[in-house]
Amino acid sequence: MIVQYILDDRLGVGSSSGVFFLSPRNEGRVAFIKHDLWPAIEMMGAMVIYVDLQADPSADPGSVIREAIMRAAGFQRWATVQTLIDLSNEVKKPIVMIIDEVQHALSSEDGRNALWALKACRDQLNSSGHYGLRIMAISPDQDALTMLTYNKRAAFFCAPIIVVDI
């Protein structure tokens, strides 16, 4: 059910803005993502790009996001929107970007800029002849998710927050 919601491409559906999941730490979230959700998304015909912003606390979140996209695309250089457009054209299927511990993106200007770049990519890929980009962000921090989705100046204003009990 959750996979169909994430991949729903109808105009005006909340998932087209992104889907933000509130999920506590140490409850099996990473195992659920990697062993259940990720394979289910791929079985529905989408490509998954996964990034954990807490995996390397010394790395800037913006750099971690860009590197995950470049690795998936097989590119050596980041070209913002064009990188994901090229990847979409190459794989010819929807792309689902899963950002675990998304609250860390708020800790740096580069991280916040990376979220805005993803929003621009999402807007371009969801409103053109491409296959679409879905942003799925996960955090145990409800305040951070609120900052990312309820503020009119936020990159993902109006994206739904779903409480997940794994």
Image (cartoon, rainbow, N blue to C red):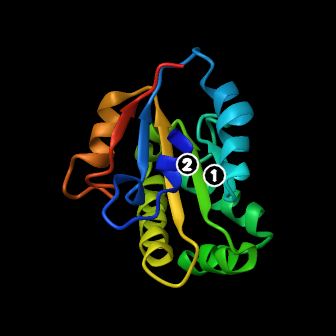
Q: What residue type is disc 1 on?
A: Val
Extreme residue in the left direction: 152
Disc 2: which residue = 61
Is the residue 148 above or below the residue 84 in the image?
above
Crowding around mark 2 (Cα neighbors within 10 Å: few <14, some 14 to 19, many 20+) is many
User: Could you tell me residue 154's position as x and y percent?
Assistant: 28, 55
Say which residue appears at 53% left-offset and 65% top-offset: 133
Quadrant in which the C terminus is drawn: top right
Secondary structure under the numbered disc 2 in the rendered image: helix
Q: Quadrant of residue 141?
A: top left
Nearest the eye: 83 or 78 = 83
Say which residue appears at 35% left-offset and 67% top-offset: 11
Task: Answer with left or right where residue 28 lies relative to residue 156.
Answer: right
User: Could you tell me residue 12's position as x and y percent?
Assistant: 30, 63
Say which residue appears at 44% left-offset and 49% top-offset: 108
User: Could you tell me residue 99's position as x and y percent?
Assistant: 56, 45
Residues at discs 2 and 1 in contact (Cβ within 8 Å): yes
Disc 1: which residue = 64
Extreme residue in the top direction: 26
Nearest the eye: 122 or 166 = 166
What mark, if any, has residue 144 been given in the picture? none
User: Could you tell me residue 63's position as x and y percent?
Assistant: 61, 56
Q: What residue type is disc 2 on?
A: Pro
